[in-house]
Amino acid sequence: MFSVHLLAYYFSKLKEDPTKKVDRFLYSMRLNDDQLSDVSARLQQEMQDVLSSRSSAAESIKMLPTHVCSTPDGSENGDFLALDMGGSKFKVLRVKVRQQVGKKGGVEMEEQTYPIPKELLNGKGSELFDHVSGSLKNFVDTNNIDLEKKHPLGFTFSFPCHQNTLNQGVLLNWTKNYRARGVQGKDVTRALMESIQRTGGMDVELLALVNDTVGTMMTCAFDDPYCEVGLIIGTGTNACYMEEMRHINLVEGDEGRMCVNTEWGAFGDDGALKDYITDFDRDIDAASATPGKQIFEKLVSGLYLGELVRLVVLKMAKQGLLFEGHVPDALRTKGKITTAHVASMEQYKDGLRNTRAILVDLGLSPSDDDCVAVQHVSTVVSFRSSNLVAAGLAAILTRVRQNRKLKTLRITVGVDGTVYRTHTQYAKRLHKVVRRLVPDCHVRFVLSESGSSKGAAMVTAVAQRLASQRRQVDEALSSLKLTQEHLGYVKSRMRAGLEAGLKSQGPSPVKMLPAYVYRTPDGTEHGKYLALDLGGTNFRVLLVKINSGLRRSVRLYNKIYAIPLEVMQGTGEELFDHIVQCISDFLDYMGMKNTRLPLGFTFSFPCYQKAIDTGTLVSWTKGFKATGCQGNDVVDMLREAIKRRNEFDLDIVAIVNDTVGTMMSCAYEDPQCEIGLIAGTGSNVCYMEELSNVEKGDGEEEERSSPNVRMCINTEWGGLGEDGCLDDIITPYDSAVDRESLNQGKQRFEKMTSGLYLGEIVRQVLLDLTRRGLLFRGHVTEALKTPGIFHTKYLSQIERQVYDRLALLQVRSILQQLGLESTINDSIVVKEVCGAVSRRAAQMCGAGMAAVVDKIRENRGLDHLDVTVGVDGTLYKLHPHFSMVLQDTVRALAPQCQVTFTLSEEGSGKGAALITAVARGGQARP
C-alpha cells in the first residue's frame, strides 16, 4: 500500500507546475521584505562599525575614504586626460569640460581602447604600468595633444585602494583576474608616474585616483546635482556614497562630506550573511579563486550569476527534476552558462526560445516544462541578486537620510555595469524593491552614459576647481588673519592711544574720559537705589536693593522697554521724554512714585565728565542719532524731562558708562576687579588709573599728587584708528563697512571688533567671494546686497555648529533664511569667513587688553600683576570661541600679568546702583 502512495506522489510531482517546482527547490533564495530589511540593517550596522573603527576592515566591507569631497557644480572648466583601468582592456580619454554662462557646462570626449595582453595581468607590475604609459603616449601623439603645457590627469583604478590623499592610493588586493607582481601594498599612482617618466615626452600631473564606482557617481553628478550615490552591478559589484566627514575616523576634519567607497562586495566575509547563504553559494565560493572572500559579490554579481544557474540546473537534473534525469558533460562544465545567458533567458518575448537554444547547445533535448523551469531558475537567481542589491542600497540611503536628519530624502543613484545595462528586467526589479524598502527616500536612478571613464576626468576637474577656489578664498581671508607681529603692533598702538588720551592737550582717538569713580565697592554699601541702563535698542529701569553685613546681597527688580528707531534718530527732547515715560511706568509698577530715590544712570556713550553727576555727550554711537544732544549735559536733559512730566522727582547721583558699571558690578564680588570690558554691540574698556597720570578733568592738585589715589578711566577705545594708525591692518571689507556706517571715519577699532559690525564684515566678504564666482555659484542675490542682513548672532550660531551633530545643515538653514542656496562647500567657506572675522575681533580685543594690563602693572612698578576683568556683552557671552581667543591673546602678549575674566551676572545696571551707593558713602534710603 505504501509503495502505491509513493508512486502516486512521484507522478503528481512530475505533473506539477514547473515554476512551483523551482520555487520549492529554491525556497531559500526567495527573500521576503522582512529578510531584506534584516540584510539592510546588518549592512548599515557594519558600515557604522567600520567607519568608527569598531570593526576590522580586513574581515568585512572596507568603507574606504576617497578624498572626493565635492560633486560637480557646473562651473568646472578645462581639458583633462583620463585613464580607466579595471578589465581586460583599458581606455585613454581626452575630456573637454566647458563652463557655460547661465546653464550647465558641456563635455566633449575623445577616447581610445587599448588591450592588456594576458601575460601582463600576471607579470611584473612595472611592465603593466609601462604598457599603460605607452598607450597614453600613443593617444597623446595620435590626437595631436599639445605637449608644451602640463595636462591634468585622472586615473580610474577599479581595485580596492587605501587613500591618504586624492592623488595617492595603496593597492590592498587585486581582483578581476589581475595578479601583477610587486604592486600590492604599493602606491599605484607613484608606479604610474614612474612609468610615465620612463616613457617620456609627456608633461602630466596626476590629480585624482578614483574607483570606477566613484567615477560613475561623478559622471552622473555632472548632469544631476542630486547624484550622491554610485552603484556598479556588472562583472563585480560595489557602491559609494557621500558620507558626513565627522563620521569618518580615518581622516581628519569634521566638516563637509567625503565620498566613501564601501567595497561592499566583501559584505558577509565575517559571517554576517551566513543565514542567507545556500549550498549553491558555498559551492561557488569553494571553487572560486578567493574562497571565503567577496561573499556578497558572489551572491549578486555578473561574474557568478550564470554559474549559480548552472549549479542549480545541474542539481535538479541529477535529482530527476529536469531533463528526465539526463546530465550531459557540458552541464557539468564550469562556465558553460554565463550571465549573458541568464539575461537572454529572461527576455520578455523571446526568453523561452532563447532558453531552449541555450539548453540545446548544452546537448540537451528539453521539454517545454524544462524550458519554463530553467527560465524560472534564472529569474529566481537574478531576482535574488537585485533584491540583495536593493537591500544594500536601502542601507546606504537610510544612512544618508538619517545623517542629514531629514524626514524624506531626494537623491539620485548613478549606475553602471553590464548586468544593469543588459538584463532587461534587472533594473525594473531593483528600482521597485528599493522604493518599497525605503519609502521615505525619493530615489532616481540614472544610467551612466559614459561609464566611469568620464568620472575620472570629472573628479580631476572638480579637484582643480576646488584647489583654485581654495587658493583664492585663502588669499581673500589672509587679510583678516593677524600674525603675532600684527597683534604686537595693535598692542603698541593701543598703549600709545591710552597715553595720548590721558594728556590734557591735543585730541586723541582714544578719549580716556575720567569717570570720577575713585574706588570700587567694599561691602559696606546698603539701601535702595534706582538705576537706568541706556546703551542699545532696549532701555532698562531697575530697583536695586543692597544689603551689607552678614546678609550681604544685591536684589534687582527691573523692566525692559524698547526704544523705537524714530526715537533713537529723532530729537533729544523726544528721546528723554520717552525715557522718563518708561521710568514713570516702572515707578507705577513698583508703587514707588512718591519716593525720592537716589539714581545712577548708565549711559553707554562717550561723555566728557567734570563730576560724577555730569556728562556732556561727545558723540553718539550704536545707531543713535538724536539731535540736540551732542555737546550737552545728558544729566541736565534727563532732569528737564522729569520736570516736564512733573509726576515724580529723583536724586540723580551718578552718570556712568556701561563699562564702568560692569567693572563695579564684578568688583562687588571680587575686590581684584579693576578693569571693565564690554564686548557686545559695542566694544569698550575702563580701568583704574593712577590719578597722578590723569592730566585732563577737574581734580584737586593735592589729590593728583597723592600716592595710591586712582580714578576709573573710560577709555572709549573703540575710536582707536581714527587717526590712521590701524591702516596697515584695515581691509577693503572694513573700509566698505565704514563707508556705509552712520559715522564714517569714526570708531575704526570698534568697527573691527564689535557685534554691531562683525556680521556686516562677513556680508562684505561673502559678497566679494560671490562676485568672484567662489561662492553660491557666483549668484549675487538681492539679500546678499542688503546691508545689515547678516546679523552677528549668525556668527555665533554658525561657529557653534563645529560641535553640533547638525553641523553644516544648520549653516545651510541660516543661509536659506537669507535667500542663499548653498552647497556643502559653500557652507564650509561661510563658516571659515565667520571664523576669520570673529577670531580677528577677539584677537584685537585681546591685544588692546594686553596694553591695558601691562600699563597698570608698569604704573604700579610691579614685576607681576594679578588682576580681574569684569566682562559683559553678548559677543563675549554667546559666541562659542570669542572669549577663549581673547584670553589666549592676552596671555601671549602680557605674560607678566595673571588676568582673570569674570562675567557680570547682572549687567551694568547693578553697577550703576553700586556707584551711586559708593558716591553716597555707602548708604541710601533703607
Image (spheres, grey):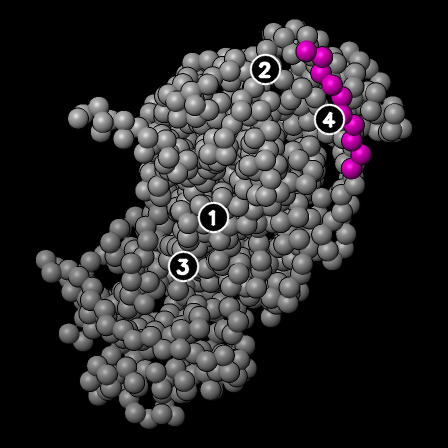
Q: What residue appears at the point 83 percent right and 20 percent down from the top-left corner?
A: 138
458 sits left or right of 299 in the view: right
Q: Which tag is nearer the camera, tag 1 or tag 3?
A: 1
Q: Which tag is nearer the camera, tag 4 or tag 3?
A: 4
Q: What residue appears at the point 23 percent right and 83 percent down from the top-left corner?
A: 589
Q: Secondary structure at mark 2?
A: loop
Q: Earlier in the sequence, mark 2 or mark 1?
A: 2
Q: Which segment did they paint magenta?
A: 109-118
Real-space Cα distance between discs 4 and 3? Answer: 60 Å
Vertical arrangement, residue 664 with respect to residue 309, above or below: below
Vertical arrangement, residue 284 with respect to residue 785, above or below: above
Q: Earlier in the sequence, mark 1 or mark 3?
A: 1
* Along the line of sight, the residue nearer the viewer: 208 or 902: 208
Q: Which tag is nearer the camera, tag 4 or tag 1?
A: 1
Q: Mark 2 belongs to which amino acid?
A: Asn
- For mark 1, what is the residue? 432
